[in-house]
Image (cartoon, rainbow, N blue to C red):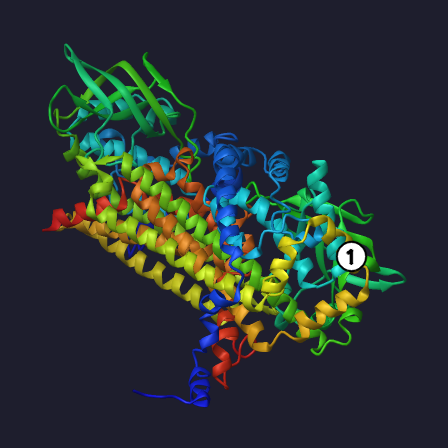
Amino acid sequence: MIANNNKELKLLGQAATEFARKELAPGREENDKFPFGPFFDSVLEKAFSLDFFHCILPETYGGIGQGISALCIVLDNICREDSSLGGIILTTCAAHEILLAAGSDELLKNLTEQSKNVADFLVAAPLFTDPSDIVPLVKAETNGDRYLLSGAQEYLVLGGIAGHALIPATIGGSNGFSFFLINLKADGIETSKPVYSLGLHACPAVDLSLRNVPARIVGKAGEGALYFDKMAARLSVVSAAMALGIMKGSFKEAIDYAQKRSQGGREIFKWSEVRMMLAGMAIDIKNAELTVSRACQAIDGNEPEWEADSIATAIKIQDMACNLTTDGIQVMGGAGYMKDFGQEKRFRDAKNIQALFGMTPRKKLKYLENII
Amino acid sequence: MVSLSRSEKKQLLAKEPLFDDFTCGLRAMGAQPKGIVKESREVMAIGRKFAEEVVRPYARELDLKMTEDHDFLPMDFVKKANEWGLYTMFIPKIFGGRGYNFSALGYFMEEIASVCLSMGNLVAVHYLGVTMLVSSWNMRLMNKILREVAEGERTGRPCLLTLAMTEPDAGTDAQNTEFMNTGSLRCHAKKVDGGYVVNGTKIFISCGHLSTWHMVHAYTDIDRAADNTVMLAVKTGTQGFSFGKTENKMGQKGSIASELIFNNCFVPDDQVCIDNRQMTGLKRSYKETNAQIFAYIWGASRAGVGYFGTAAARGAYEHALRFASEQTVDGKRLINHAWCQSMLAQMYTNVAVSRVSCLEGFHANAMHGLWKLMNLKVVYYMVKYTPAIVLDKIFIWLSEKPFLTWLFRKICFDFQADEEINRVDGWGSLIKVAGTDAALKNCQMALEIMGQAGIRHDQGAEKILRDSKLLQIYEGTNQVNRLNVFKRLISKSVSSADVFSASNI
């Protein structure tokens, strides 16, 4: 991620790099054991205190209003070491973006200003499905000025650790879906154990069962898809920045190892076949970095078609990250497959990140629909 | 109409690509016993039954159990596989096994591994050890050890074999004679009266902690290891031999990877599979013979990994197909979206192409490699229709005669032509790469189709992706195997080509 001459962005990037090196890298293997090991609460608290969660939140809501570039720089640097924290930040930012898109100022203010700790501040959301593709299984019924939600919500990211959640649900027989804000401590909610998943283990998701759970509607009824699409357009490039960070981490570990490990009496770095793989990785990273930086510029500058820039960048770079992390393991052979190193986690996390905001083929088709 | 003379035809077919290099299956049609087809049907049916009754219900549970505690040893599964007779299925009847033909092994393993690669490995790795033992053509030792496997089945105490080659600083170095002398091999075998004393460590040894016999590669001179390799059979419990840690892996968790530690471990002469003394008199040099043994091992075992790749590609495809059949997307079943049908068709194609290439590789082994002798029609039918009790009597007596090992080595080492070695080893690498790359490709596609469901452990597909990645690494990385394809199948036609040398790596 290129900060150009923006000193604030550079400082933010340095802070994220330092944080990732000191706080994330040493505990990566242990933190990845969740839910079979402890959750990294203290790391989360430190990240919160450094305002990594507040990058794009406008100052009106207690944020620092730095724009998408800032968030991308933070997540690029964090995800080099461990993208689970990146996933937690992205999820909360996504919920904030949906609330902003819906114009739900009061709800957002309540969430951000009244939060006493990081758990209160976090907002859970089902980020791995586009609710327009798959009809939500939660139904909303009106109860005077409030709504009651019932049904099942699968794979609610941060559902086990956040104070609140955004839930897509359908109202009566109306078309489309709406978003609702619920308090996850309310009566009528049953939460599963963390769903064991391919990657992002420390950014856990749960399955939720709801029965007459009080909820506040977000924005207008039936306009959930509009809010989701706005959020996805702005944050797709952020998911690309996460993938970029993973790519950089994978490349660094691979090249470090290749310079230490020998086969046939020579460092494997000297094998031209290995060098060709490393060269391909380096070229992909450079391309990804340029593309993410350009897309950020387009979004922050509110340029025409910034949405297309963001989404196309994400689809392409997520795919590149899946391929690059495969090579990242391959360069290291058996060692890359073991949990003693970071490569296998990056391979898993990259594939998880590719599933953000819905199925990849559907994202491609939707992209085409939006540009023609 | 063009008419060619015999010499013209010979001359034309001797040009690259050599007719014999890519027609193993075609030539096998007439040369191989027809009984293999019936056997293949049988073992596929057994594989399906085992996969449904034993493997599928336990696959995700075992994976989770190993995630919680990677030191867990899945001995219960091994005992179950032993009860089903899976560890003797492909051991020839002359050694007390059930005697299914090795050519049918791929079909059998595909059924199990398409459901769970870990449990596939818990069965198949045993046959990797068997492959190493057979590749030494030490008939006395084969008879001794393989009959212990059969005895283990009868008594309910599983007796499995491993292949112990990889060392902490030597993966590829241990697998190719070209790298052995300049590599970082450390496992030393010192000749003493009555045997060898072994010191060193082996790592990533699949199923080590679960196995009884370990086929260990050690070196009497580690600076000239390619010319001084000793292949030893070491039994669990031998003084000076112990197990170290098990690796914490991304996938194939149930198939544990063990560390084997040798500390002044004495291995008697009668447990030497083959060494330089036993190679004396063969027509090739020690180094060439070691390379030939590697070719026997890798030609067969990499073909097996290719089948594992096919299996994983199929497993991923089946998960995606199930999901697409059940899930509604954008108002209609996912299976009815043309883009999804196209992706599923590509995945199906990947499985089919991979399977066909594996089959060709298996035919290469049957026609020119490890099980060529057993597949000669006269040998096949004689062994098949002679009662086991008669075979036992004859073969137990015969196996103790040094003449028998000499004869087998004469046939299998000296009579195997260089072209056959190239073909078997080259095809092993080719299908290993093709099959395992297809596996990764299909897993990636399955997860893309399945989206959120794809990344959930309880949906099964993500496990196949994690498991599959290892296929591109073990038995030589796909990078090394591609170079081996060049060496064995391409470079012979280019006089200036130089492979696996300091100048080209």
Query: Is residue B342 left or right of B417 when viewed as pictured?
Result: left
Whole-percent x and y of residue B326?
Answer: 28, 34
Q: Is residue B249 above or below residue B229?
A: above
Q: Is residue A97 above or below residue B314?
A: above
Whole-percent x and y of residue A11?
Answer: 36, 48
Front in this rendered view, residue A3 or B261: B261
Whole-percent x and y of residue A58?
Answer: 22, 35
Q: Is residue A206 above or below residue B269?
A: above
Q: Chain of mark 1?
A: B
Query: Is residue B402 left or right of B319 when viewed as pictured?
Result: right
**Looking at numbered disc 1 in the image, what kind of residue is underneath it?**
Asn
Query: Is residue B433 left or right of B421 when viewed as pictured?
Result: left
Which residue is labeled 1 in the image? B199
**Residue A75: quadrant of the picture:** top left
Q: Residue at x 35, y 25 (%)?
A: A207
Front in this rendered view, residue A112 or A136: A136
